């Protein structure tokens, strides 16, 4: 179909949750490139919002999906599933988790983490410990509970009243966190690097203080690594930057390279709170999803893509120093690895993003001021040079 026809069908039949989308429809991809229905080539530096970790059409992922689809796509969790057990093992053997539960998305994984934290204390005879402290500018999902956990009013306001007993504090503010915790607090939940909130990393001092506070208060620490996990920040898991281990952490986005899956991961003493019948999922952890997850996670580990993210990310930050000096409109470049935010002194992020799109570079934004860069983990320094050169051309026009 032609693009105009696709747009008209979308406007007529699809719920208007995305407004006026960027006017392009992609038909296929290869590596870091996407191709539209006119055959135009685009450099993908957004990776489906940190999802396509291996880029597009990676043979390991394509072969895993095709091979598994020929055998068995789905069966009930009433039965044992080999791929599910193997993917859980791979996560546990490479992380601080002892147990894993598979869901279908990051929001579901976070919802499971909230349920598990509350249930843990209920089973310890403390049913009043169910409040959770999260951070301003966080993003944990779009279900009612994860919206309540999300520290951004723009997402919450249309759906009030929300699930109660969530409070929010600023990132990297230890004193504010201490004040927010009370006798009914069961957990602190945070993203080691905030994504949708503008790419704000937590400091090492803050993360160590949070772990210490949780230990002293006897409450759980939950890390949402839905976006920042799985090699994105230059470590397989973002918590590894800090020398701090959570009691619970969640994964999704990159885990199966585009096939829907989420993971709730926990240490044994917490995970054991779940008993048969207390949590579940029809589709979560089915053979096809877990085969895709095995292919992606194995490739990230075996091909050392976390190291590539660190090396190429550091290269980008170094190159951006000179660009920042040349263009004062850039107020800050921040992030870790290949999770990067460029903040502007003026609300021009969307304008910059559209001009990059016109030059066939795909990036994203956060609010009016932050340009977000989330390329596939296979990106090279030469690819980054191309982006930097085009960004300089765009900023020359904006200035």
Image (cartoon, grey):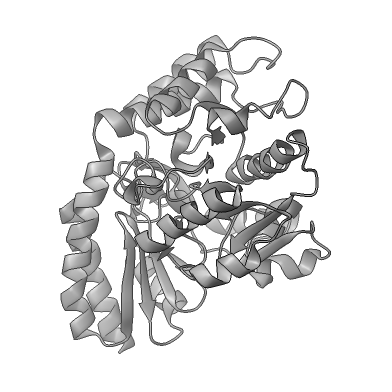
Locate the C terminus by quadrant. Answer: bottom left
Can you give x and y, in whole percent of width and height, for residue 215 in the image? 53, 48
Is 292 on the left or on the right of 312, as rendered? right
Q: Which residue is found at the position 65% from the left and 41% from the top?
A: 108
Q: Position of residue 113 (x, y in %)?
A: 63, 41
Give the image location of residue 185, x and y in percent. 69, 55
Is 234 left or right of 188, judged from the image as shown?
left
All told, the count of numbered labels is 0
Q: Is residue 90 above or below residue 16?
A: above
Choose between 315 and 336: the one closer to the eye. 336
**Residue nearest the viewer, comparing 91 with 58:** 91
Let me know if residue 346 appears in the view: yes
Corner quadrant of residue 152: bottom right
Instruction: Name the residue at 48% across, 38% down.
Output: 258
Q: Position of residue 86 (x, y in %)?
A: 46, 17
Residue at the farthest right position: 161
Q: Name the image quarter holding residue 124.
A: top right
**Residue at x 57%, y 66% (from the top left corner):** 177
Left or right side of 199 for 289: right
| Residue at 35 percent of width and 42 percent of height | 55
Q: Can residue 362 be seen?
A: no
- Asked whether, in this view, residue 333 is left or right of residue 258, the answer is left
Residue that lies at the very extreme toward the front in this rendered image? 216
């Amino acid at each position: 179909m032609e693009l105009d026809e696709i747009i008209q069908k979308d406007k007529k039949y699809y719920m208007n949750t995305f407004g006026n989308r960027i006017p392009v429809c992609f038909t296929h991809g290869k590596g870091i490139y996407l191709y539209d229905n006119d055959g135009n080539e685009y450099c993908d530096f957004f990776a489906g919002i940190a999802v396509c970790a291996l880029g597009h059409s990676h043979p390991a992922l394509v072969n895993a999906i095709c091979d598994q689809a020929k055998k068995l796509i789905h069966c009930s969790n009433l039965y044992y599933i080999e791929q599910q057990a193997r993917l859980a093992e791979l996560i546990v053997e490479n992380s601080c988790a002892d147990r894993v539960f598979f869901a279908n998305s990051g929001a579901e994984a976070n919802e499971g983490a909230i349920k598990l934290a509350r249930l843990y204390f209920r089973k310890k005879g403390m049913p009043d410990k169910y409040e959770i402290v999260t951070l301003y500018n966080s993003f944990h999902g779009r279900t009612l509970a994860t919206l309540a956990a999300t520290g951004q009013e723009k997402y919450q306001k249309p759906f009030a009243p929300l699930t109660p007993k969530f409070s929010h504090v600023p990132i990297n503010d230890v004193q504010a966190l201490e004040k927010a915790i009370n006798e009914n607090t069961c957990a602190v939940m945070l993203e080691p690097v905030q994504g949708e909130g503008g790419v704000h990393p937590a400091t090492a001092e803050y993360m160590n203080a949070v772990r210490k506070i949780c230990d002293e208060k006897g409450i759980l620490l939950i890390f949402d690594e839905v976006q920042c996990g799985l090699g994105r920040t230059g470590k397989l898991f973002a918590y590894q930057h800090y020398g701090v281990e959570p009691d619970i952490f969640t994964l999704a986005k990159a885990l199966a390279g585009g096939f829907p899956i989420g993971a709730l991961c926990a240490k044994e003493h917490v995970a054991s709170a779940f008993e048969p019948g207390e949590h579940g999922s029809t589709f979560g952890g089915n053979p096809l999803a877990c085969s895709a997850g095995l292919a992606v996670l194995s490739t990230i580990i075996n091909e050392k893509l976390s190291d590539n993210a660190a090396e190429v990310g550091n290269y980008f930050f170094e190159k951006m120093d000179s660009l920042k000096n040349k263009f004062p409109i850039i107020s800050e470049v921040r992030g870790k690895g290949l999770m990067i935010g460029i903040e502007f002194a003026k609300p021009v992020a969307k304008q910059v993003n559209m001009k990059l799109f016109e030059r066939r570079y795909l990036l994203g934004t956060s609010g009016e001021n932050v340009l977000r860069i989330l390329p596939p983990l296979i990106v090279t320094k030469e690819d980054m040079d191309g982006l930097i050169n085009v960004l300089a051309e765009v900023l020359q026009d904006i200035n």
